Image (cartoon, rainbow, N blue to C red):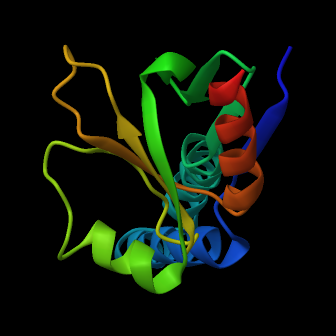
Amino acid sequence: MVIFKEVLRPPIWVLGFIYFLFLSLVIAIWAAFDTKAAVASLIPATIAIIYIAFAMRSTISFDGKELRIDQAHIDIKYLGDITILDSSAMRLLRTRDADPAAFLAIKFWVPTGLKIEVLDPRDPTPYWLITSKRGENLAALLQNSKTL
């Protein structure tokens, strides 16, 4: 049973910008060829933006025993300190203070997140850095589950 689930979808402005780039290509094709070629290129561009909208989303879920972010998962017993990051702390940890060995599940359009230390001695990953709009809720659930 999932007790926490958050789906991070790309905002409409990101999708709009990507579609604008696709439409620029369609116009270039129309200018170079004809209307048929432009329509023939518009169809795959529209299908591609729908695919991109689904591919860019990210799902964070927690069932009380395991934290799952898309395909990655970690058991609660391997989680260490959990730090809630505001936008400025997140910006530093994504850039200047980043550890190359860390697991990053970040989306550039979400400014806040969590840093979760990994305590598994077999895992070289020092921490997970994840973006979340509801980081406080997730941190509280993880802390409560660790103490049980």
In the picture as drawn, the residue positioned furthest to the front comes out as 147
The reply to whether residue 85 is in sight is yes
Residue 52 position within the rendered picture, expressed as x and y whole percent measured from the top left = 56, 49
Position of the N terminus, as image quadrant, is: top right
Left or right? Give the position of 15 relative to 23.
right
Instruction: Please identify the quarter of the rendering in which residue 16 is found.
Output: bottom right
Q: Residue at x 55, y 78 (%)?
A: 86
Instruction: Name above or below for residue 23 compared with residue 132.
Output: below
43 or 17: which is nearer to us? 17
Position of the C terminus, as image quadrant, is: top right
Numbered marks: total: 0
In the picture as drawn, the residue positioned furthest to the bottom comes out as 88
Instruction: Name above or below for residue 38 compared with residue 49.
Output: below
Residue 53 position within the rendered picture, expressed as x and y whole percent measured from the top left = 64, 51
Q: Residue at x 15, y 28 (%)?
A: 124
63 or 140: which is nearer to us? 140
The reply to whether residue 31 is in sight is no
Instruction: Name above or below for residue 91 compared with residue 103.
Output: below
Q: Residue at x 49, y 60 (%)?
A: 107
34 or 112: which is nearer to us? 112
Instruction: Please identify the quarter of the rendering in which residue 111 is found.
Output: bottom right
Left or right? Give the position of 121 relative to 72.
left
Residue 138 position within the rendered picture, expressed as x and y whole percent measured from the top left = 71, 46
